[in-house]
Image (spheres, rainbow, N blue to C red):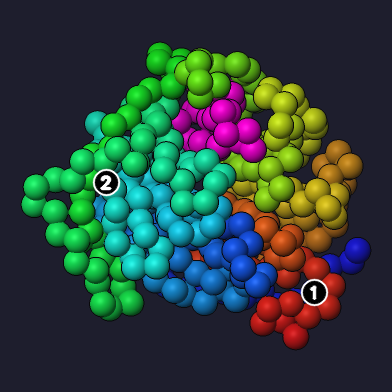
């Protein structure tokens, strides 16, 4: 398939670098949603197909490092430099839970199930924590009024769900990313000690580890959850999404890779660099030595996050330049591309 050259959709609104973005699953009638984390403290919810702004989650007091939606898009989770993770209702914008930590939170993950009641967090504490959101206790001064303006507020009840640590003492430095696998009993972490680790949630212990060569930029599952893609140093690593620790392929490039996302259906993957402003499209069966299949130009800063939509028809990129761009990745018309 030759991807037709279409002008990307640019999503404005953030005032600082975009650190992370992720999609929900397809919810109903081919609809899905996109959330972006940003150093401006304010994660944004968007229509995934058009990029149209739906709302901004207001409440964090520091840079937001990671943001994820539940598979059914009813909940959002955010990790922040204000030493907290928050869980939000995406319909009202209410902050449902604030999980206080002792240091910066870099990563959050929901299990892939509707309106999940558990959340994993990690960050500078070097601890992989799991919280039971159904067991939260409300603080006495909670105010549950719902905001009426389109800008979402954090005036929901602040709750303190009980949490426990997975793999105590295993992480030797900051946890950069957390992925909840297709198997709900498996949690995956990407750590600044250059290790990808797989944990069994039931035994709370590691079941596999893979050391990568270089600082980890991104670590994400593809929408079908069949492949885990990791950008580290000058390489893109592809692991099985179902067999812990099984590496499928490693592609090494001349320059450092900041982000990577894979589209198995098309046999392609995309990379974002931290030394240039382009998204590059590659053959998944190639070795990264030649020229890319395509180059998407339009950002004005490094690209820290990439992800394909759940239907595989577009790719989203989040950049240091403060914008999110949506790139068409299919033949014919789609969404706003007619």
Instruction: Compare marks 1 and 2 and give the one earlier in the sequence.
Output: 1
User: How many residues crowd around disc 2 within 10 Å: few (fewer than 14), some, or many (20 or more)?
Assistant: many
Judged left or right of residue 276, residue 252 is right
Q: State the quadrant of the N terminus.
A: bottom right
Residue at the left extreme, as displayed: 141
Q: State the quadrant of the C terminus.
A: bottom right
Question: What is the span of residues highlighted in magenta in the rendered image?
Answer: 175-199
Q: How many labels were placed on the picture?
A: 2
Identify the mark at residue 117; answer none if there is no mark: none
> Was residue 44 drawn as part of the magenta stretch in this picture?
no
Observer-nearest of 153 and 133? 133
Is the Cβ of the residue at disc 1 closer than 8 Å to that at disc 2? no
Observer-nearest of 158 and 336? 158
Observer-nearest of 208 and 7? 208
Report which residue position mark 2 lands on.
98
In the structure shown, which secondary structural element does the residue marked by tag 1 occupy? loop
Q: Is residue 308 above or below residue 175?
A: below
**x and y, in percent, of residue 4 in the image:** 83, 73
**x and y, in percent, of residue 41 in the image:** 32, 57
Report which residue position mark 1 lands on.
5
> Was residue 191 drawn as part of the magenta stretch in this picture?
yes
Judge whether residue 34 can be spotted in this image: yes
**x and y, in percent, of residue 229 in the image:** 68, 39
């Amino acid at each position: 398939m030759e991807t037709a050259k279409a002008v990307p959709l640019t999503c404005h609104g953030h005032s600082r670098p975009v650190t992370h973005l992720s999609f929900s699953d397809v919810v109903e009638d081919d609809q899905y949603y996109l959330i972006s984390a940003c150093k401006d403290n304010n994660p944004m919810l968007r229509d995934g197909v058009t990029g149209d702004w739906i709302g901004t989650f207001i409440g964090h007091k520091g840079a937001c490092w990671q943001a994820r939606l539940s598979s059914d898009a009813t909940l959002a989770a955010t990790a922040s430099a204000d030493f907290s993770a928050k869980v939000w209702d995406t319909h009202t914008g209410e902050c449902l839970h604030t999980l206080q930590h002792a240091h910066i939170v870099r990563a959050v993950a929901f299990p892939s199930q509707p309106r999940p009641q558990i959340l994993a967090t990690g960050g500078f504490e070097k601890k992989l924590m799991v919280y039971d959101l159904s067991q939260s206790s409300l603080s006495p001064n909670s105010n549950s009024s719902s905001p009426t303006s389109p800008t979402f507020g954090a005036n929901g009840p602040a709750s303190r769900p009980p949490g426990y640590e997975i793999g105590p003492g295993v992480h030797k430095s900051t946890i950069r990313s957390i992925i909840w696998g297709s198997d709900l009993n498996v949690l995956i972490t990407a750590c600044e000690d250059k290790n990808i680790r797989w944990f069994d949630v039931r035994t709370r212990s590691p079941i596999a580890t893979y050391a990568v060569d270089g600082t980890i930029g991104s670590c994400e599952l593809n929408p079908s959850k069949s492949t885990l893609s990791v950008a580290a140093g000058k390489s893109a690593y592809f692991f099985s999404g179902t067999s812990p620790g099984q590496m499928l392929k490693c592609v090494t490039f001349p320059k450092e890779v900041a982000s990577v996302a894979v589209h198995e259906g098309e046999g392609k993957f995309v990379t974002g660099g931290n030394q240039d402003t382009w998204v590059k499209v590659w053959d998944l069966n190639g070795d990264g030595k030649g020229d890319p299949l395509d180059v998407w130009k339009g950002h004005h800063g490094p690209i820290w996050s990439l992800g394909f939509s759940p239907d595989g028809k577009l790719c989203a990129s989040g950049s240091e330049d403060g914008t999110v761009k949506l790139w068409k990745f299919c033949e014919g018309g789609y969404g706003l591309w007619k």
